[in-house]
Image (spheres, rainbow, N blue to C red):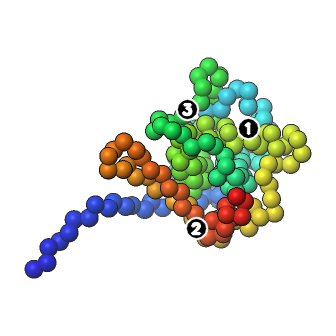
Amino acid sequence: MGKIKKSNFLSHIRPLSNNRGSKGIGKNSKSKRVSTSDLLIPKRHLKSLQRKILKFGSLKKFLHFLLLTNRSKFRSLCIIPKNEKTLYQSINQDLVRFSFRPDSADWAELRVLARYYGLSICNLFVILLEIGEEGSSSSGSPPFLSYKAKSLEGKGNEMALIQRILPSRRYISFSLFLRGSLSRKFASDS
């Protein structure tokens, strides 16, 4: 009889809800059950963020916009950290809490990118916000907004973050894999 091999591979899949544009918020509405998330924003960015929320209608829609328009720049966004500790925002910034219900896919993408760069989710969001402020103050239009950005939406783009603790347990390896038109976009921008 053949032996059953134990696998050293664990995997799971969680469904990501997309409640963007859902109208009804009734008893059985999925959007009502989506849990809230918090972003801590330094007070110096408060007015700018409030203007963006008014312009886009919600923080959820603004987060989606930030991810969509800056996707092609993620490769050169940050310096890869040299240690395993997550870099949080500096203390004494008078952080203001913004609670909202982001789309699961947007929140997962932000979390994967933050983990890849060794940043907290809030820190990465603030960096994206600062990039947006720099871009809109100089030209009047959002940063990195290109005619290609809209072509990324709904075209089977996938992003995967692979983390491996190497056998010596002294290093952790991160790999970010892109599939679909998103990977071609990254390649053409480098």
Q: Is residue 168 visible?
A: yes
Type of amino acid under label 2: Arg
Residue 164 appears at what percent x and percent y? 40, 52
Circle 3 packing at 10 Å, graded few (<14), some (14-19), many (20+), is few
Type of amino acid under label 3: Tyr
Residue 13 appears at what percent x and percent y? 43, 62
Q: Which mark is residue 88?
A: 3
Type of amino acid under label 1: Glu
Residue 104 appears at what percent x and percent y? 55, 54
Q: Which mark is residue 177?
A: none
Q: Which mark is residue 130?
A: 1
Image position of 13 (left or right of 44):
left
**Number of numbered tags placed on the structure image:** 3
Pointer 2: what residue? 179
- 89 is higher (above) or lower (below) than 110: above
Which residue is drawn at the image coordinates 37% and 49% (left, top)? 165
Which residue is drawn at the image coordinates 33% and 44% (left, top)? 169
